[in-house]
């Protein structure tokens, strides 16, 4: 090593003082132990907080479930009250008519008329109960594959005579050729029939009702358009509520059921209406409909 190199070399470290080293080690150990114990405490705190969070989550889930159950019970309670109200009116009328039948010396035509009215009210009751059952949750619909043109033809056949009898023009569009879908044909026919019946109730003599169908990708849309009285926004807002009706003879379940059927087919119902101008309902379904339980 040259003297110059020697001069550049760093000064050697002073000899270690064993006492200070020992002290440094002791301190180091002490700090390590403190750190380890702090870490342990932290870990326990994290564990406790995690457990608390899990408990809070479980409580939230329980509360949510309870709220949902209460909501269902309230809805059921309201429905039961409405149903009782709906059942009471025709039942009271039927009882009244039937009671009158017991009167002695009734002329034959009066007796017949009373019997007829009794049966009418009882039929109304029966229909109400059938509709209720259809509306009830969890109804599982069967499925089949059918030509949409067949469904349209069936609807035309049942509805044409009704429209003619009321002096209403009824036009049916044509389905795209070869268009098929999978779903519950009977339930769909029932849902579309209700839309047609609603239109028939809303149009005057000489009015027009048109049933059409269009297909796009995997969806099919059935449209029912009328130039009837239309609806005010506050009626549109309540359309799908079970038992909402503006007709003395209506059960108010028609649209609630129709929407349930559309939803069970992976679709829904849209409506556009203007008072005095008319109404258009569009019921969409998915072509390869899942057909889920009705809501
Ligand atoms: N095309 C329409 N034009 C005018 N109002 C309509 C039309 N469709 C439905 N409505 C209104 O919506 C209400 C509810 O219809 P919905 O089919 O649910 O019951 P409803 O026809 O009264 O009774 P139901 O169908 O159970 O016999 C009707 O009472 C009516 O006021
Ligand atoms: Mg109806």
Image (spheres, helix red, strand yellow):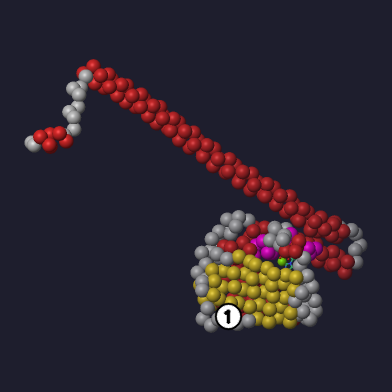
Instruction: Decide which of 204, 130 is in the foreground and name it.
Output: 204
Q: Which residues are magenta?
A: 244-258
Q: In this view of the protein, which residue sits in the foreground, 18 or 64?
A: 18
Give x and y (percent) for residue 188: 60, 69
Above/below status of 78 relative to 165: above
**Which quadrant contains ligand 1?**
bottom right
At a point 75% along the width and 73% down the height, the residue shown is 278
Would residue 79 appear left or right of 90 to someone viewing this image? left
Q: Quadrant of residue 104?
A: bottom right
Q: How many marks?
A: 1
The image shows residue 161 at horizontal and vertical percentages of 72, 80
Q: Quadrant of the C terminus?
A: bottom right
Q: Is residue 20 magenta?
A: no
Displayed quadrant of residue 196? bottom right
Q: Which residue is mark 1?
A: 175
**Farthest residue in the front direction?**
4
Q: Which residue is painted at 63% across and 78% down in the image? A: 212
Q: Position of residue 251 (x, y in %)?
A: 73, 61
């Amino acid at each position: 090593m040259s003297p110059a190199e020697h001069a550049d070399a760093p000064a050697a470290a002073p000899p270690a003082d064993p006492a200070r080293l020992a002290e440094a080690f002791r301190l180091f150990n002490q700090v390590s132990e403190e750190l380890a114990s702090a870490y342990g405490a932290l870990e326990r705190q994290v564990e406790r907080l995690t457990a608390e969070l899990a408990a809070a989550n479980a409580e939230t889930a329980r509360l949510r479930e309870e709220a949902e159950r209460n909501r269902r019970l309230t809805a059921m309670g309201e429905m039961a009250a409405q149903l009782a109200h709906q059942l009471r009116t025709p039942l009271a009328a039927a009882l009244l008519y039937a009671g009158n039948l017991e009167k002695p010396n009734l002329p034959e035509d009066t007796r017949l008329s009373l019997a007829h009215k009794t049966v009418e009210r009882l039929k109304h009751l029966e229909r109400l109960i059938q509709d209720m059952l259809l509306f009830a949750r969890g109804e599982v619909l069967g499925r089949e594959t059918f030509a949409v043109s067949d469904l349209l033809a069936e609807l035309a056949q049942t509805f044409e005579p009704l429209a003619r009898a009321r002096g209403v023009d009824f036009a049916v569009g044509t389905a795209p050729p070869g268009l098929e879908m999978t779903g519950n044909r009977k339930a769909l026919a029932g849902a579309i029939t209700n839309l047609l019946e609603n239109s028939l109730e809303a149009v005057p003599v000489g009015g027009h009702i048109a049933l059409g169908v269009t297909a796009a990708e995997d969806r099919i849309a059935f449209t029912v358009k009328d130039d009837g009285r239309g609806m005010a926004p506050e009626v549109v807002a309540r359309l799908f509520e079970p038992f909402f009706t503006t007709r003395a003879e209506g059960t108010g379940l028609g649209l609630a059921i129709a929407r349930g059927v559309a939803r069970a087919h992976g679709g829904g119902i849209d409506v556009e209406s203007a008072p005095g101008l008319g109404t258009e309902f569009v019921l969409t379904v998915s072509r390869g409909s899942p057909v889920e339980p009705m809501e």
